[in-house]
Image (spheres, rainbow, N blue to C red):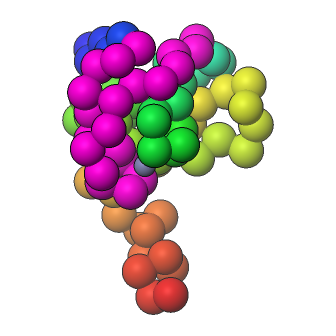
């Protein structure tokens, strides 16, 4: 299991920029990582990498991984 601390260097799962962990919170469903790029990431349990947090509430995390759920990103690519 990927574990990250505040200040750990990471690549954002949303904007793909190299950034670092700004804040870590434990939420329903796992850990939420707020990064210096202002994006909120979660860890995909299958790939063990940072991915988009698709939760609709700040109280839970729902990793949405491009590798595991490519269909979820199809609409976005068409924009
Ligand atoms: Zn980002
Ligand atoms: Zn995955």
Spot occupied by residue 19 in the image (x, y as percentages of width and height): 32, 38
Residue at (41, 80) in percent of width and height: 77
Give above or below for 40 relative to 52: above
The image shows residue 26, relative to residue 52, as above or below, that is above
* Relative to 79, residue 65 above or below: above
Residue 24 among magenta residues: yes
Nearer the observer, 7 or 11: 7
Across and down, in percent, residue 42 comes to: 46, 32
Horizontal placement of 19 versus 59: left or right?
A: left
Residue in the foreground of this view, choosing between 21 and 72: 21
Query: Which residue corresponds to the image point at 58% horizontal and 47% vertical from the top-left?
Result: 54
Where residue 41 appears, x then y in whole percent? 47, 37
- Residue located at (52% from left, 44% from top): 39
x, y percent for residue 24: 51, 16
- Quadrant of the rendered image containing residue 70: bottom left
Quadrant of the frame with the N terminus? top left
The number of numbered discs placed on residues in the rendered structure image is 0
For residue 29, which quarter of the picture?
Answer: top right
Can residue 13 be seen at all in this image of the molecule? yes
Q: Does the magenta stretch include residue 33?
A: no
Q: Residue at x 73, y 44 (%)?
A: 56
**Range shown magenta:** 6-26
Is residue 30 something one can see in this rendering? no
């Amino acid at each position: 299991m990927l574990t990250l601390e505040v200040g750990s260097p990471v690549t954002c799962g949303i904007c793909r920029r190299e950034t670092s962990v700004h804040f870590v919170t434990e939420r329903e469903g796992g850990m939420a990582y707020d990064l210096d790029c202002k994006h909120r990431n979660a860890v995909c349990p299958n790939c063990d990498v940072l991915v988009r947090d698709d939760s609709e509430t700040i109280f839970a995390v729902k990793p949405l991984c491009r590798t595991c759920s490519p269909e979820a990103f199809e609409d976005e690519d068409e924009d």
